[in-house]
Image (cartoon, rainbow, N blue to C red):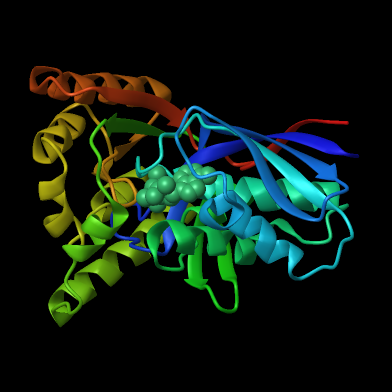
Amino acid sequence: MNEVKIFCPASVANVSCGFDILGFCLDKIGDEMIIRKTSKPGINITKIVGENLPYESKKNVAGVSGISLLNELSTDFGFEIEIYKGIKSGSGIGSSAASSAGAVFGINELLGKPFSRKELIKFAMKGEELASGSIHADNVAPVLMGGFTLVRDINSLDIISLPFPKKLFASIIHPEIELKTSDSRSVLKQKVPLKKAIQQSANIASLISGLYTEDYKLISRSLIDVLVEPYRSDLIPAFNDLKKTSSNNGSLGTGISGSGPSVFALSKGEKTAKSVTSEMGKVLVPLNLKFHSYTSKINSTGIKLISSR
Ligand code: ADP
């Protein structure tokens, strides 16, 4: 095998009460990448379509993640990468994670799979570190492993795949504004009151329980973020209206996707999710703001091979 074409899905991190530790993988929304073996050692990014991103390997998350993998193995050949962006960079639905995971997944396939999907997270996190300035796996873990993932500890790669009810669907609204991860990190408080920490722990614990037991009502009661959303929501246009509309149309809960500006909602059933997506979109129309909207099932497979030769 000398060349692979892969689909690199978008993802939602944080999921309200799971700041920096919880994420899930989206379906159909994503990038494509072509990765091929070359005689020239190292990583060469030869094509980027759809976004204006750096070609220099050390400045592109795909290059950084790929180099981190190659540092662990010695090969006398290298890899060429083509990136076809379907996810806008800085959207909050894991644009950088799609490329970081894509590079290491593709290279691993071409090397005969020396690493498991979980082991690849270690290398993909290096790309995330370049994109956001902090090392985290809450996007790359669901992209590589599929479904919902819980990151207990990044150093020991203690990452757990969670079950989820099959009728769970996501709505995504991506308002086209620029919101830098560094800005949305800077509004966060470094110290939190004990009472709020207890509330947040209770919600994340009960959300996980709701996912295991397929208890939609418990999932709904648990999708509350008392630590981050109160500070970040001001950065997102009409966030409170979006949340109210989503709830009025039957969603289980609504929150900020990653560090924003995208907003996600979870619903029981595709029909409800589609109406939540469309009604949330209507909230942004009077603001004269361009936006993208998607309804997606939870992608249980994660990143995948489209073709190889
Ligand atoms: P998102 O949540 O959508 O991933 P981030 O702010 O975390 O957004 O990451 C986007 C940042 O990563 C931008 O500064 C972008 O220039 C940088 N970047 C580098 N390479 C890539 C890539 N291949 N895909 C997306 N973003 C990249």
Image spot of residue 102 (x, y percent): 63, 45
| Image quarter in which the C terminus is found | top right
| Image quarter in which the N terminus is found | top right
Image spot of residue 40 (x, y percent): 83, 50
Q: Can I make out residue 119 in this image?
A: no
Q: Quadrant of residue 190?
A: bottom left
In the image, is 220 to the left or to the right of 22?
Answer: left
Please name whichever residue, 22 or 62, is drawn nearer the observer in this view of the structure: 62
Q: Can I make out residue 284 in this image?
A: yes
Name the residue located 23 percent from the left edge and 35 percent from the top edge: 177
Please name whichever residue, 59 or 88, is drawn nearer the observer in this view of the structure: 59
Please name whichever residue, 298 or 258, is drawn nearer the observer in this view of the structure: 258
Please name whichever residue, 50 or 55, is drawn nearer the observer in this view of the structure: 55
Q: Quadrant of residue 195?
A: bottom left
In the image, is 234 to the left or to the right of 76?
Answer: left
Image spot of residue 225 (x, y percent): 22, 58
Name the residue located 63 percent from the left edge and 63 percent from the top edge: 123
Query: In the rendered picture of this protein, how many numbered marks are placed on residues?
Result: 0
Image spot of residue 49 (x, y percent): 54, 28
